[in-house]
Every structure is written in structure tokens, then in C-alpha cells.
Image (tube, rainbow, N blue to C red):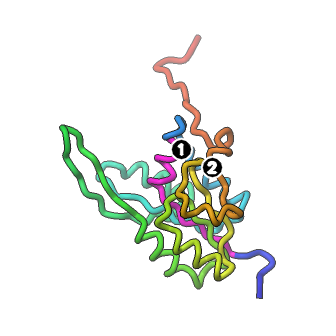
Amino acid sequence: MKRKNPIIYAFIDSQNLNLGVRSMGWKLDFKKFRLYLRNKYRVQEAFLFIGHVSGNEMLYADLQKHGYILIFKPTLEFHTGGKTKIKGNVDAELVLHTMIEKDHFDEAIIVSGDGDFHCLIEYLVDQKRLRRVLVPNKKYSSLLRKFNQYIVEISELKESLIKKKTKISGRSKP
């Protein structure tokens, strides 16, 4: 039996989301995004899958304060050409936690444009439990094209979700 107000959870690939909007030249305000999920889709729980990097504790605390449940992935550092790259692919964790939580929600929102989530999205559609797939921009995987009726491009919401630069100066004007 369908509830009048279904329980909706969001499962967010933070790296795909972050890099996707940054590739378009703007930064996502994660506080505004959590409010958007709550107000637009009535998302009760928002699971944010993120690589754990030492030194980012303030970021993690802020994300939790804004209402995200953080699921950490250990990261690996690679050194190539004098640069350090950090890798923390969260795909397996996102799929696993969606399945762990499936008895607690009626519908899910997947936030990623990554084709690796095709099987999860297909499963949720088959179970009539997919609300939406929020992709960062138009450059999402062609594997997800068959789910176009569920797709919402976050880039279309830029004006309401952009992180505004704040001016902080050392002294106030007289």
C-alpha cells in the first residue's frame, strides 16, 4: 500500500556532484542543496558518500550540521608528475547503503550522473521506488539516458543553489 506521504531518502555521490557543478564554473552550496532536497522532495534522510581526507574535519562537521549523514570511504594518495591526487571512489558504498536502507524508505533519489549506478537505478525503477536521479549537468552517462523521465539536471538550479562569495574585510567602514 502506498503512503500518502512516502518516506524519501537521498543517496549522494559527493565527488560526482561536486566535480560536475565545478566543471561548469560554479560551487554548490551544500546547505542550500539539503534544503532543496527537503523542500522539493521531502527527503527525510540524505546520505552523502565522501572520501575521508585528514584535515577536512570542519567540512565534515558543517555537512552534518546541514543535515547530511556522512558515509566515508577511505582514500588513497597517488603521486604523479609532482602532483598529489586523492582517490576515493564511493560507488560500491552508495549501492550497498541504498540496499541496506531499502526497508526504511519508500522512494529514493540518486544524486550522480555516473553510469555505474545503472543497475541500482534499474532495480529501483523495477521496484517502483525511484523518485528522481539528480545529475550535475548535461554530461551524464549515456547508460542513464533510458531513465530520462526521472532525470533532473542540477545545473538548471544554479541560481538557487550557487555558493555566494562573501566579502569579509579586516575593518568596518566608518
Identify the residue at the far right of this view.
Answer: 4
Q: What residue is drawn where x is 55% and y is 31%?
A: 165
Measured as percent of width and height from the top left, residue 9 is found at 61, 70
Does residue 116 lie above or below 14 as drawn? below
Q: Which residues are magenta?
A: 7-22
Identify the residue at the far top of this view.
Answer: 174
Measured as percent of width and height from the top left, residue 93 is found at 42, 70
Q: Quadrant of residue 66?
A: bottom right
Q: In this rendering, would 38 be left or right of 78?
A: right
Q: What is the spatial separation of the Cα atoms under label 2 and label 1, in whole angstroms?
A: 8 Å
Could you tell me the amino acid type at mark 2? Ile
Provide the secondary structure element on which disc 1 rests: helix
Could you tell me the amino acid type at mark 1? Val
Disc number for residue 21: 1
Residue 12 is inside the magenta segment: yes
Does residue 168 lie above or below 28 as drawn? above
Q: How many neighbours does mark 2 have within 10 angstroms: few (below 14), some (14-19), or many (20 or more)?
A: many
Q: What residue is drawn where x is 58% and y is 55%?
A: 135
Which quadrant of the figure contains the C terminus? top right
Residue 19 is inside the magenta segment: yes
Q: Quadrant of residue 35?
A: bottom right
Residue on which the image places disc 2: 154
Q: What residue is drawn where x is 46% and y is 46%?
A: 19
Evaluate if marks 2 and 1 touch, with contact meaning CB atoms under 8 Å apart.
yes
User: Counting residues from the N terminus, which is met first, the one under dot 2 or under dot 1?
Assistant: 1
Does residue 62 lie above or below 22 as drawn? below
Q: What residue is drawn where x is 47% and y is 56%?
A: 14
Q: In this rendering, would 151 be left or right of 48?
A: right
Identify the residue at the far bottom of this view.
Answer: 1
Q: Between residue 174 and residue 85, name the one nearer to us.
A: 85
Q: Quadrant of residue 52?
A: bottom left
Q: How many neighbours does mark 1 have within 10 angstroms: few (below 14), some (14-19), or many (20 or more)?
A: some
